[in-house]
Amino acid sequence: MIHPNTERRFISDEVGYGVFATQFIPKGTIVWTLSSLDTRFTPEEVAEMPSDFYPFMEIYPYIDRNGDFILGCDIDIYCNHSCDPPLHNIGGTDVAIAIRNIQANEEITYDYATNNIIHDLYNCRCGAKNCRGTISSRDLLAYSSQWESKVKNILSFVKKVEQPLYQYITEKQEFDNIINGIIPVPPYIDFLCPPEVVHKLKVILGIEKHTSFFSGVAGS
């Protein structure tokens, strides 16, 4: 679920849609959280879908640490990638906060590498000064300490700003313990889906061919 002061806007034929702030959102604000309203699909459920669904499932849901496909309940599915996004997850949690002030009409992006990327490599043309040129499934390991530092520097602001999404957080106790300094920020590597599970997902979506993982997969 994404912050209420946002809206979907068409950007271009090449990019499609994006999510933009309709009002100023101060740093420390929860901009996105996994909620009970989002939809979870197991790998087995995706395998039973018609193959025409697979291009959609490659793009719009994100893949969690268990290999489940999480489809957002609102316009968060239209968030684009940036190598210099205004928000990051609080380490390995399902809550993302603004790491800097987000101005009205600014596009709200996040770094796709903080999710489990189903393809090994994407070309990137985000336009950020620090654009990496490619988005890799290995970026999370390479940049996790840098991202965690950015988030830790902002945690003190979380309790100082209005948080309309707090009520939707699925793991409130963990969130409260992190913000209050009772437990450390979980490392980003807690997000990582095991390589063998990622491979199974590629098989399901037809990105890689194999016949032994899911007997119910069409064509297996």
Image (cartoon, rainbow, N blue to C red):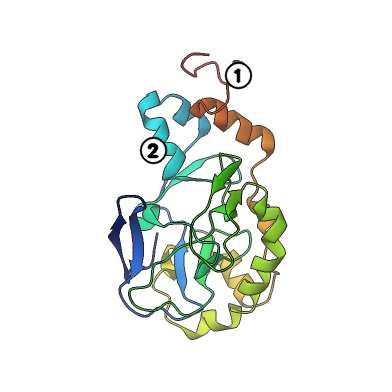
Looking at the image, is mark 2 or mark 1 earlier in the sequence? 2
Is residue 141 something one can see in this rendering?
yes
Tag 2: residue type?
Answer: Phe
**Residue 210 — which label?**
1
- In the image: residue 191, left or right of residue 57: right
Task: Kindly indicate the quadrant of the structure image that contains residue 201.
Answer: top right
The count of marks equals 2
* Label 1 packing within 10 angstroms: few (<14), some (14-19), many (20+): some
Tag 1: residue type?
Answer: His
Task: Kindly indicate the quadrant of the structure image that contains residue 153.
Answer: bottom right
Q: Position of residue 177 (x, y in %)?
A: 63, 71
| Image quarter hosting the N terminus | bottom left
* Label 2 packing within 10 angstroms: few (<14), some (14-19), many (20+): few
- In the image: residue 198, left or right of residue 52: right
Q: Secondary structure at mark 2?
A: helix
Q: Position of residue 43 (x, y in %)?
A: 52, 32
Q: Position of residue 59 (x, y in %)?
A: 43, 43
Q: Position of residue 7 (x, y in %)?
A: 29, 64
Most extreme residue toward the bottom, as rendered? 160
Q: Look at the picture and state if 140 lies above or below 70.
A: below
Query: Residue at horizontal 55%, vertical 69%?
Result: 129
Q: Secondary structure at mark 1?
A: loop
Q: Look at the picture and state if 5 lies above or below 75.
A: below
Give the distance between the C-alpha atoms of the residues marked 2 and 1, in whole angstroms: 21 Å
Query: Residue at horizontal 49%, vertical 70%?
Result: 86
Is residue 37 something one can see in this rendering?
no
- The residue that disc 2 covers is 56
**Residue 200 — which label?**
none
Query: Mark 2–mark 1 contact, CB under 8 Å?
Result: no
